[in-house]
Amino acid sequence: DLMNLNGWHIFTKWCLASKNEENLSSLLDLLLTQEEKESISSRCLIIMELLKHEKTQRDIASHLNVSIAKITRGSNELKRTPSSVIDFLKENL
């Protein structure tokens, strides 16, 4: 849908233009509900744990108190993620 694609482009443009963590945090406070921020936070922690390769998926689910299905979704998305993005994420753990 064209409107959503344009909205996503605006969102990513604003995020990139934020320049620092304080500005980005304020922008995300404006755009996201508390529930959306918690969901993104959870997804980031899942991806971080998966990239570390220190725990099983079941252990990650237990440690983060999330369903194994969420861990599996994160793992499947990582498999589709370009290696350049994986390298970026690992460098910024």
Image (cartoon, rainbow, N blue to C red):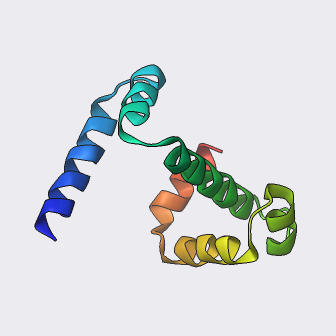
- Location of residue 23 with respect to 76 vertically, above or below: above
| Residue 17 position (above or below residue 86) | above
Residue 43, located in which quarter of the rendered image? Answer: bottom right
Left-right relation of 10 to 39: left
- Residue 4 in percent (x, y) is at 20, 61
Residue sitting at 63 percent across and 74 percent down? 75
Quarter of the image with the C terminus is top right
Q: Tell me which corner region of the image, top left, top right, bottom left or bottom right, holds residue 1.
A: bottom left
User: What residue is shown at x 53% (from left), y 73% (from top)?
Assistant: 77
Q: Is 91 displayed left or right of 66 in the figure?
A: left
- The residue lying toward the viewer, choosing from 18 and 33, is 33
Check the image and name the residue furthest to the left: 2
The image position of residue 55, as x and y in percent, is 85, 65
Q: Residue at x 78, y 65 (%)?
A: 53
Viewer-proximal residue among 40 and 82: 40
Residue 57 position within the rendered picture, expressed as x and y whole percent measured from the top left: 79, 73
Image vertical order of residue 47 relative to residue 56, above or below: above
The residue sitting at 68% across, 52% down in the picture is: 45
Q: Position of residue 56 (x, y in %)?
A: 84, 72
- Vertical placement of residue 59 versus 87, above or below: below
Number of marks drawn? 0
